[in-house]
Amino acid sequence: MQIILGDITKQEVDAIVNAANTSLLGGSGVDGAIHRAAGSELVHECRLLGGCKIGDAKLTKGYRLPARFIIHTVGPVWRGGDCGEPELLAECYRKSMQIAADKEFESLAFPCISTGIYRYPKALAGEIAVKICSEQIQNNGGPQRVIFCCFDRENYEIYERILSNYS
Ligand code: APR
């Protein structure tokens, strides 16, 4: 597992994960950035998917992105931590890793799901992200390269600290 500080729309990987909403029709944050970079064909494919439940994940092509595919997942909104948020966030990572393993992707990049507009505490989210991806790699093989693509230094330093406990 690797950490980078950068823009996920620039990553040349088999798939990038999008922190979407249940409509899958785009938004702001990383969702907006991915739709802008992928181009207008993306939303046409998304329309055919009939939305996405919180904690679930769905695959589309990457269109104009350097990434070949996009795995759209919908993270939970943070409501204090007692409304099933940890389990739902874990499902986002688990389902995304499962799709990547099923498709035999070699490389996969995640944003810090739910930690922006959905206000999930960054450190708690990072712990879940690393734990689930580490488990999936051990159990399913999964992509050789799992990249945590942080857009801000705070998240980057959080992931550095978490991953240092995994090596
Ligand atoms: N590359 C990588 N990470 C990015 C990028 C980018 N280009 N742009 C934003 N991010 C980061 C944010 O800084 C944050 O760390 O993605 C993380 C997730 O933040 P959001 O995009 O706000 O996603 P989230 O908190 O999951 O909220 C999802 O926001 O955009 C809407 O439609 C989306 O309703 C959904 C909600």
Image (cartoon, rainbow, N blue to C red):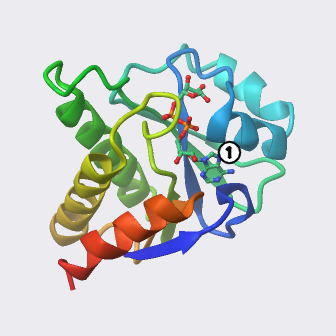
Question: Would you say 84 lies left or right of 67 here?
Answer: left
Q: Residues within 10 Å of mark 1 (few under 14, many from 20)?
A: some
Nearer to me, 143 or 123 = 123
Residue sticking out furthest to the bottom: 167
Q: Which residue sits at x=36%, y=64%?
A: 158
Give the image location of residue 43, x and y in percent. Answer: 75, 26
In the picture shown, does residue 146 fall above or below 136? below
Q: Is residue 157 found left or right of 130 in the rendered image?
A: right
Secondary structure under tag 1 reads: strand
x and y, in percent, of residue 22 in the image? 50, 17
* Image-quadrant location for residue 50: top right
Residue 66, quarter of the rendered image: bottom right
- Left or right of residue 82, residue 164 in this image: right
Quarter of the image with the C terminus is bottom left
Identify which residue is drawn at 33% across, 29% down.
55
Q: Relative to the observer, which residue lies in front, 34 or 150?
A: 150
Q: Quadrant of the N terminus?
A: bottom left
Q: Which residue reaches farthest front? A: 154
Going 23% across and 51% down the picture, which residue do you hit? 128
Q: Position of residue 136 (x, y in %)?
A: 23, 61
Left or right: 131 with respect to 73? Answer: left
Which residue is found at the position 53% from the left and 22% from the top? 21
* Amino acid on which the number 1 mark rests in the picture: Lys
Ligand 1 location (quadrant) = top right
Where is mark 1, residue-wise?
Answer: 61
